[in-house]
Image: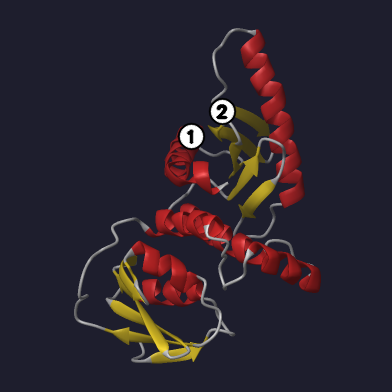
Amino acid sequence: MTVNVQGRLDQVDVPGVVELARQTGETVAVVITDGDVQGTIYVEKGNVVHAEYREWVGAEAFYHLLAVNEGAFELRPVDDVPHRTIEKPWNTLLLDALQYLDEHGLAIGGLSEGGTREAEEATGVENGPRENVWERYLAELLEGASAIQGVAIVGTDGLVYAAHAPDGSLDEDLAGAVAAAVYALSARSVSQLNRGNLQRTLIQGDDGNIIVTVVNDRTLFVGLTPKDVNLGMAFAEVRTMVRQLAEVVNASV
């Protein structure tokens, strides 16, 4: 990587800066300058392994650094990290950060809930900071998938938390409406026929398939496949994604 990559946080948010460090595959110190205070996030082989900021150390320091929206950043290659205080995978760490920031009235980029609403009114874009992180998470889930071409996290009421497809073909509103309708009908049918609790619904079409999987009693996972896909592979990939998602989504959404 280029030594001492520098920039301003009004140009890219902290998760974006950390993503740059992750993509190098090297051990990198991400130094965030917040006024007169410096915080550091250490990235090793694609994962955040340590963070220091003000009085916080470890994951809590990382969470608070995500809320910094002014100042500068610098990427510095390092030989090693001083401590290893974070052992969570990147996906899990991001979603845990969302939960923590929500509980403390913060959000990515330093916006409180009220500040987020003000930003939405000014820009016309809903849930900008939150959506950004969820979409990164979904992109991470899709990276290693070969049978799934689009995914969405949807509430059982049809509210779409995030949706992602590399080709941009996934309509979020339609995904939410379809997922909620499929869930309601399938859950009722399973119950009426005494088949226990609903786990998954498969809808097959000429040009591909829709897989709706229950994450918990409030959250659904939607996966889209191309036509002629190996359904065994598709189900296996969906199970892996849902298992990762279920570890952190319960309290986050």
Amino acid of disc 2: Arg
Q: Is residue 16 visible?
A: yes
Task: Identify whether 185 is placed above or below 91.
Answer: above
Instruction: Provide residue 149's location: percent of width, then percent of height.
Output: 57, 50
Instruction: Provide residue 44's location: percent of width, then percent of height.
Output: 28, 70
Categorize mark 2 by other alpha carbons within 10 Å: few (<14), some (14-19), many (20+): some
Categorize mark 1 by other alpha carbons within 10 Å: few (<14), some (14-19), many (20+): some
Does residue 113 appear to the left or right of 102 in the view shown?
A: right
Amino acid of disc 1: Phe
The quarter of the displayed image where residue 239 is located: top left
Task: Identify whether 101 is placed above or below 52.
Answer: above
Pick whichever of labels 2 and 1 is earlier in the sequence: 2
Nearest-to-viewer mark from 2 and 1? 2
Label 2 element class:
strand
For image coordinates 61% across by 29% down, the residue present is 202
Instruction: Provide residue 160's location: percent of width, then percent of height.
Output: 68, 48
Residue under numbered circle 1: 235
Which of the colour schemes (rainbow, by chain, secondary structure, one colour) is used? Answer: secondary structure
The quarter of the displayed image where residue 243 is located: top left
